[in-house]
Image: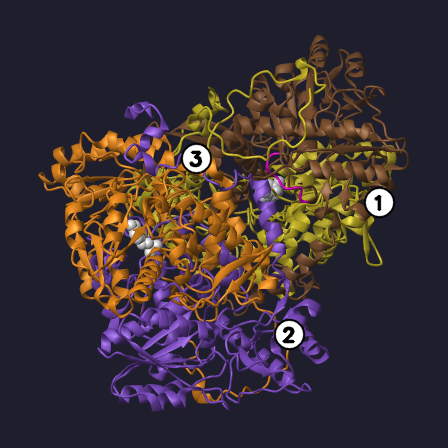
Chain colours: A yellow, B orange, C brown, D purple
Amino acid sequence: MTTGITKVTSHISPNEQLIFERSQTGRIGYRLPALDVDEVELDIPAEFRRDDDLEGMPEVSEVDVIRHFIRMSTWNYSIDIGMYPLGSCTMKYNSRLNERVARIAGFANLHPLTDDSDAQGALEVIYELQQHLAEITGLPGISLQPAAGAHGEMTGIMIIRAFLDTRDGAAASHRRTMLIPDSAHGTNPASAHLSGFSVKTIKSTSEGLTDLDHLRELCSHGDVAGLMLTNPNTLGLFERNIKEICDIVHEAGGLVYMDGANMNALVGVSRPGDMGVDVIHLNLHKTFSTPHGGGGPGSGPCCCTKELERFLPVPRIVKTDSTFRLDYNQPQSIGRVKAFLGNYGMMLRALSYTLTHGNDGLREATEAAVLNARYVAAGLAEVYDKPFAGSPMHEVVFTDKRQSRKGVHTLDIAKRLIDYGFHPMTIYFPLIVQGAMLIEPTESVGRQELDQFVAAMKSIASEAVEDPELVLNAPHSTRIGRLDEATAARKPVLRWKP
Amino acid sequence: MTTGITKVTSHISPNEQLIFERSQTGRIGYRLPALDVDEVELDIPAEFRRDDDLEGMPEVSEVDVIRHFIRMSTWNYSIDIGMYPLGSCTMKYNSRLNERVARIAGFANLHPLTDDSDAQGALEVIYELQQHLAEITGLPGISLQPAAGAHGEMTGIMIIRAFLDTRDGAAASHRRTMLIPDSAHGTNPASAHLSGFSVKTIKSTSEGLTDLDHLRELCSHGDVAGLMLTNPNTLGLFERNIKEICDIVHEAGGLVYMDGANMNALVGVSRPGDMGVDVIHLNLHKTFSTPHGGGGPGSGPCCCTKELERFLPVPRIVKTDSTFRLDYNQPQSIGRVKAFLGNYGMMLRALSYTLTHGNDGLREATEAAVLNARYVAAGLAEVYDKPFAGSPMHEVVFTDKRQSRKGVHTLDIAKRLIDYGFHPMTIYFPLIVQGAMLIEPTESVGRQELDQFVAAMKSIASEAVEDPELVLNAPHSTRIGRLDEATAARKPVLRWKP
Amino acid sequence: MLEAIGLGSAAELFDSIPQDLRLERPLNTPAALSEIELLEWFEQLGTRNAGARRASFMGGGAYSHYIPTIVDHIISRSEFFTSYTPYQPEITQGTLQAIFEFQTLVCQLTGMEVANASMYDGSTALAEAVLMAERVTRRSKAIASSAAHPQYLEVVRTYVQHAGIHLDLVPFDEKTGQSWKALAEAVDDSTAALVVQSPNFFGCIEDVAALADAAHAKGALLVVCITEAMSMGLLKSPGACGADIVVAEGQSFGVPLSFGGPYVGLFATREKYARQIPGRLVGEAYDKKGHRGFVLTLATREQHIRREKATSNICTNEGLIALAATVYMETMGRRGIQEAAHQCAQKAAYARRAIAGLKGYSLPFTAPCFNEFVVRAPGKAADLLSRLGKEKEIEGGIALSKFMSDRPNDFLVCVTEVNSRAQIDALIEGLRTI
Amino acid sequence: MLEAIGLGSAAELFDSIPQDLRLERPLNTPAALSEIELLEWFEQLGTRNAGARRASFMGGGAYSHYIPTIVDHIISRSEFFTSYTPYQPEITQGTLQAIFEFQTLVCQLTGMEVANASMYDGSTALAEAVLMAERVTRRSKAIASSAAHPQYLEVVRTYVQHAGIHLDLVPFDEKTGQSWKALAEAVDDSTAALVVQSPNFFGCIEDVAALADAAHAKGALLVVCITEAMSMGLLKSPGACGADIVVAEGQSFGVPLSFGGPYVGLFATREKYARQIPGRLVGEAYDKKGHRGFVLTLATREQHIRREKATSNICTNEGLIALAATVYMETMGRRGIQEAAHQCAQKAAYARRAIAGLKGYSLPFTAPCFNEFVVRAPGKAADLLSRLGKEKEIEGGIALSKFMSDRPNDFLVCVTEVNSRAQIDALIEGLRTI
Ligand SMILES: Cc1ncc(COP(=O)(O)O)c(C=O)c1O
Ligand SMILES: Cc1ncc(COP(=O)(O)O)c(C=O)c1O
C-alpha cells in the first residue's frame, strides 16, 4: 500500500473529545481583576435577565483549553505542512511577517469609529493599498469594504445595476439579464441574483473559452445588463478574446464584470483595466496571501473604472495634501455593504505582501505560479486526460476519464492523494468538466515537491489499473476514513446536546 | 494491538529531510536593507578572511524553512499534547502569558551591560523574584546567576568550599569529602567533583531514606565537607529525619546542600531553611514552570543562609530606597559562574508564575501535584511492584519486578506506553532501584487523563503476561521504531557531511 | 524548470495573452522592502493612530474586552491559520470539530437550536436574516427599529434594495430610548420580519419577549440583533424570549478592535428553519468503522451547488475569527462570561450614575442598559470628545451627531471590564473640567 | 480524588513531613494577579528600561542583530518549547533532527569536525574547554589572553580554581591591541591550553593561525573563543587556522539581548577528542526497518552515567536557544550570514573612520577589526556615554572603565547591520557636540 509514498509516514495522533465532554463543574480557565467599584443593584428588571445560569457552557482550565486545541490542530493539513494544490483557491505561503504587522498595537487596538484625525496611520494604509491595487488591476476606483470575494461580486454587480439605472432610468428595468459562463464559480450567479438579475448561461467552446457566437446571440435581445467573466477562466485558460468579448457586451449596452479570483496568473503581467473590464473583485486571501484561516476571513476589494467610481460603497477615503479622511457624501453610492471599513486586518497583511515583494517580486511570483502549473500539466499529461489543449496559466484541469473506465473516479483519486501526503486538488469544479480535477500549485512550492506530486498522481493512476480497490477505499492512513455524508445530511446533528 | 488504547489513533505524519539535503544553490530566505554606507576596502588582510565562501551552509527559501521545522515539530511529544509523567523533571504546563511577558520589548531589547540607571525595571524584576524565592525556601541569600540546576549545584558547593576554607584556613584541606546518597542525581557527584571534592556514597535504608547510622559513621572521620541531599528524595519520599541529618552533618563540621529539583512537593508547605539546610538550588524550569524547550534553557538559582551570603557569585543586586544597583564589591565571593546576569528571560517567566499563582495558588499547585502522584500510586500498586511502602510526595517509584519474570523490562513498558499515547515516565533512575519507573504527574493534569494513564499501565501489565512480544517490540505506532543506539555510539555520526 | 517544459524564457509563459494586453513595463508600485524597513514603516504608522493608545469608552458595535493570551497563541497555530476550508474531512477534523463547538456555543448563548459556521459580521448577518425571513414567510415587508445600529440598517438597506423587500423603520421612544412598543404596533399580516436590536444602539434594553408575541400573532418572524455579545452573559437569551432568528456581532469574544475587522457574525435560528440558513454548517458524521467525525453538511443550500437559487452567495466566511471566539468562550467559560458581563454592567452603572450627577450633563433615555448609555452634554458632543482625546488622552465615547444630525449634544458611552475605576474617574473628571 | 485515595483533607497529603517542619502560615508573597494586572505591571517595568529603547552601539559579548520574524514563530511551537530533553527518540525526532542540524551548522561555521548540542553560554563553554584541555593533555596550566572578555576570564577562573589548573594571563600589546605574540611566547611544555579570543574584547583580530603553530609545537591545545559569532561570516574559521577547541557565544544568531540571557554556548572540536566533549551529542541511528533517525549518543561521557567522572556536570543545556540559532542560520543561510557580516564590517569601518576624525577622539589600537573597536575620548568615557544616553537617546558603547580602571577614557563601540547610517551619523554628531 505504501508503494511510492515518500511524503508521509504513519505516526500516533492524539485523540480529543468535544470540550463539552471534558467540562467539569467548578473548573475555570480565566482570571479577571476583582471588581473595583462598589457593587450596586442594577436597574435591569428580573424578566430581562438570564435565568439559566449559562447552564451547558464549558467549565475547563487553561491547560485543558490549550491541550484541546493543540491536539485538534494536529488533525489538520495546512500550507505549512506542504503543497496545497487547490485549483481556484490560490493556497500560497502566509508570511509570518504579515501576521506580525497585523498585530502592531497601533492598529490592533484602534476602534473603527475613531475620529479620522486620530487614525491617520490606519487610513494611510488603506489609501496606499488602494493605490497598489489600482495599479495592478488598471482600475482606479477601489473599495476595500467587501469582506470576501462573493461580497465583492455583490458589490460590483450592484454598481453595474446602479450605473444602468442612472443611465437608462425606467428603461433599465428591461435590462435585468446577467450573462455568466457555464464554467463560472457558484458565487457568480448567486451574487447576480442578490442584485436582482436573472442569469443566462453562456456556453464554452471545445477549446474551453467563451463561445463568442453564443455571446453575440445572447447580447442581441437588448436585455443584457452585463457579463460576469473569470479570467483566466476556471479552466485556467486566458480568455484570449477578452477585448472582443468586452466590445460585444459594451455594444449591447452592458458592462463587464471580471471575477478576479485568478489574478495570481496576471499580477504584473496583464491588467483587467486594459482588457476593457469595467468592474472586478480581488481576493486578498488568495492572490495577496492573507491566510485562509480554515475558511476565512477574506477580503474582496472591488475595483472599477473612473466612470463607475461614484457608485462605490461609502465611506470612500480621500487624501488632501497629506491628510486622510473618510467621505460619506456620495449620493450615487450603492450604500454600505458592511459595518465599518471592511476586514482591515487583511488589508494590513496584503499591503505587507505587496511591499515585501516589491513590483519585480510581484511579477516573479506570477511567473513562478504559472511555471509550476505548466510543469505539473506537462508531468501529468501522459497519464490523465487533459480535456483542453490550450496551455494553462496558473492552474490546470484534468479529468478522471481514463481512470473511470476501471470505476475509479475523481473523488477516489483525491482521497488516495491523501495517503500520499498531499491535500487533494479542487474536484468536480468547474461543473462543465466531467470529473474535473483542478490543480493550482501556486508559487509557494519547489520543484522537489512538484515532482513528488506528479509521481504520486502517476502512482495512483497505475493503482487504479492494478488495484482499484486500494484507491476506491482510500484514504487508508488517516485517523478517520470517509465519512457518511449522506446520513449526516439526512439526519443533521449540528450541535452537541447535554 | 489497540486494546484499551484511548488516547491516540494512527494518522499520516509528514516526512522531512535534513535541511542540507533540501538546499539549492541560489535560494535565499532572508532580506536585509541595502548597505547604506559607501563600501570601502576593509583593513582586514586576506589571510584573516574566510576563503571557503561558506560552502555547505544551506541555501533555502523562507517557506522551505517554515515547512522544514513545522514538519519536524509534528514528530515531537510535548506538554501541550498531554501528560508528561517524567519523574524528577516536573513537566508542568508552560503558561503562554509568561512567554508574552518575556517578549516585552523593554526587556527583550535590553543590553546586559546597560547602566543600572537605565535598567531599573529589569533589576527590580530580579530583586522581586529573589524576595519570592527567599520566602519560599526560607533561605535569604539568593543568586539567580546559575543557568541550570547542575550549575546551581556547582555554585552552592563552591560556596560551601569557600566557607570551609575561610573558617578552617589550611586545615580545610582535610575536609574534602562530600557525602552523597546512592539515590542522588548524577549531577550531584559531578558538581561536587568540579569543586574539588571527593565523593562518598551514603546508603539508603530499606524504607528508601538516608541511612542515619551510615551517615554518622561517615561523619566520624573529620573529613566531611558536607552532604548533598535531595528532599523529597529521588524516590519521592520526604526525608523525615532531615533535621537530625542536618544536625549530624553540622556537628561533624560540614554543611548541608539540598538539591531543590523536587521543590514542587514543598512550595508553600515546608521550607528547606527551616529544616536546617544551608544551601539549595532551585530549577526554575521545573518548579516554576519555565519551558524545558527540548532540553533547555534552564535557570538554577542558588539560595543560602545569611551566613553564606557573602560567598555568592558577583554581581549581587542591592536595593537602596527605591533604586537598584549591581554590587561587584564582594571580596569573599566565589566569583562569577556565568557572563552577565544569568538566564534573565527565565526569571521573567518565573516571576510571572509566582505572581499569577499568588501565595495561595502556589500552595494549591503543590497540593495538586502531590495528590496526583498519590492517586497514581494507589492506582498502580496492585499491578506493579512498589519498592517502598512510604507514601510518596509529588512522585512515586515503581519497578518492573513482576513483569520482568516474563522478560518484560522497564524499557519495554516505557516504549509500550508510547503506543498508548503517553510520554514514558523516567526510567532506570534512581539507580539504586532495579528497573525503576519514576512517575511524576505534576499538577497540570486532570483526573480523566490520570485514569487513562493508570488504565494504560494496567493494560500493559496484562499484555506483559498474555503477549510479551507485543510489549518487547513496542512502540508499534510511531514513525520510527527503536533505534540501534549501540551502533550509533560505536560508530558515531555526529554531523551531516556533503 | 523552463527547459523541462520546453520554454526558452519566462515571458513565453504568457504567450496565450495577446501581445497588446501584456504589461511591458514594471508595475508602478514600490520596490521591495526588507523586514527591518517594513516593520519600521508600519510601527511608525501605528504611532500615528493616537486613538489606539488612549483609555477608551467607545462601543457602538465594537468593544474593548480583555483577550486571554492563549487566544492568539492558538489561532496562530500553522494548522489553523494556514489551513483551507475543511472540504476534505479526513485531514481537517481539527477545524471541523472547532466549528461544531462554535455552533454549539452560539446556540447555547443565544438560546437557539441551530447556528451556522459564521457570517462576515453582525451587519451582514442581519441583512441575511431579513432575506431569510422573506424566504421563510414568502412575505416582502421588513419592519426594523430605528434604534438599531445605523450602519447595520444601511447594510440591510443595501442588501434588500434589489430583493423586492420593503424596509420600514419605526421611531424609538424619545423618553425611554426603546422602540419595541412602536415595533409591536407596526407589525401586520404582510410583515416578514420584525427587526429589533437589544441592547439597542443607545444601549437600551428592549422588551424582546413582548415583540415575539406581537410578531408571532401576525405570522411574522422576530429577528433579534445583538452588537454587544457580552450582554448575553447577563441578559435573557433571545431564544428564551421567543426569537426566530438571532444574529450577533461576535467581536466581543476575543477579537481585537483592529479598526473594524475582521470580526465575526453569529447566526442562529430554529431547527425547523435549518435548511433556510445562509452559509456553512458543520454536522456530525461517522466512518465505516464507526468513528465519530465532522463534515460540512446541508451543502445543497449553498452557492457552489444551488448557484442563483442558493440561500446566500457567501462562500469564504470568518473561520479563524470564529475560532478565536470559540477559544475565548471556552477559556472564559460559563463563569468567566458571567463575571465579565457582571463587571461590565456594574462599571457602566457606576459611570452612568456619576456622569448623571455632573453639572450640565443628563441622561436622555430612561430604559435599563447593559454597558452602554447615552449622555447629553452641555455643549456639542463632538467638540467635547475631541478635546477629551487631545487634552486628557481619553476616548470618551461616540458623538451621536456622527449618525444623527438632530442630536448634537448626545454621545454614547461604553464601559467594560477593562476600564479600571481610575479610568472611569478620569473620564468623569475630564467631563467635569473640560 | 482525595476520597479515592482515602484521605480526608489536602493537609493529610503532607503527613510524612514532621509537624514542626510544616509551614502553618500562608507564604508572604503577593496574592494572585489577573492577566490584565500582570501585563500592566510588567509593561510599566519595561518602560523603566530606557536602554531598551535607544539606538545602541553596545557589544562586548551581546549584540543587536536583525532576527527574522519566523525564528520566534518556530521556537514558539508547542512541540518545540514545551517538549523535554529527547530521551525517547521515537517521539522526539523533531528536536533530535534539529540538534543534529545545529551540530552540523556549528561545525561548518567553525571549521571543526564535531560540535555538541550546546553549552549554557560562551563563557561557561570557554571554562569547559579549559577543563577539557586538561583532560586531553593531562597538563595543568592554561595560558589565556588578557584581551579576552573580562567576564569570560572571571568565569574560567571560578571553574578552574578547584580543578588544580593554574591560569596565567598574558598582557596584550598596547599598540596593536592584540595578544597573540605574547601568547605564542608564553606557551611551554607544561601548557594544556592556549586560550585566545578573536576578535578579542577590544574588537581586534588575532593571528590565530600563528598561535596554532606555537601551541602545537609545545603539545598544547589551542582554544579559540568567539563572542561575536557573526564574525565567522567574514573571518577565516578557527578550524581552518588550526584550532583544537572552538567555543563561541551564539547569541548573535537570532537570540534577543534579553538583559544577558538565555543565550547559547557553541562548543566544537576535533573528531579525535569527541569522547572528551562535555554536554550532549546527537548522532544518526537506524531502526530495524532501516529508517534513519537521531538519538542522544556517547552518553557514557555524561553525569547521569559517569557521575563524578563525567566530562562535565551539565545536564539541562540551552536547547530552545540552540533551536533559535538553527532557524536563524538556516533562514539567513549561506548568503545571508555573509551579507550580514559584510554589512557589519562595512558600517563599523565607516563609523570608525568618522570617529577617528573627530577632534579630541582617537583609536588607541591599530589591529584590524570586524565590527567592534575601541575609541579614546577626550574625557571620562563613562560620563560621555551617560550624557549621550540621556541627552541624545543613544547607547554609544561600553566604557572600558567598567572592567579596567586604568582606561578611563576608552570605550568600546559596536556597529551591526541594524545600525542605519542615520544612527551612525547621529552617534558621530553626538560625540562631536557633547
Ligand atoms: C473563481 C472564484 N470566484 C469567487 C470565489 C468566491 O470568493 P470568496 O470565497 O472569497 O467569497 C472563489 C473562491 O472560492 C472562486 O474560486
Ligand atoms: C534531582 C535532580 N537534580 C539535579 C538536576 C539537574 O538540573 P539541570 O538539568 O537543570 O542541570 C536534575 C534535572 O534533571 C534533577 O532531576
User: How far apart, in angstroms, are the residues tagged by discs 2 and 3?
Assistant: 49 Å
User: How far apart, in angstroms, are the residues tagged by discs 1 and 3?
Assistant: 52 Å
Residue B57 shows up from this direction: no
How crowded pointer 3 is (Cα within 10 Å; few <14, some 14-19, many 20+) is rated as few
Give the residue number, with chain letter if any, for mark 3.
D25
Residue B232 shows up from this direction: yes
**What residue sits 68% from the left and 73% below the top?**
D422
Give the residue number, with chain letter if any, for mark 1.
C387
Q: Residue type at mark 2: give it.
A: Asp
Which subunit holds the residue at mark 2? D
* Helix, strand or loop for disc 3: loop
Give the residue number, with chain letter if any, for mark 2.
D383
Relative to residue A363, is residue A467 drawn left or right? left
User: Residue at the top extreme?
Assistant: C217
Is A290 or D204 nearer to us in this picture?
A: D204
Relative to residue A334, is residue C257 drawn left or right? left
Is C425 or A29 nearer to us in this picture?
A: C425
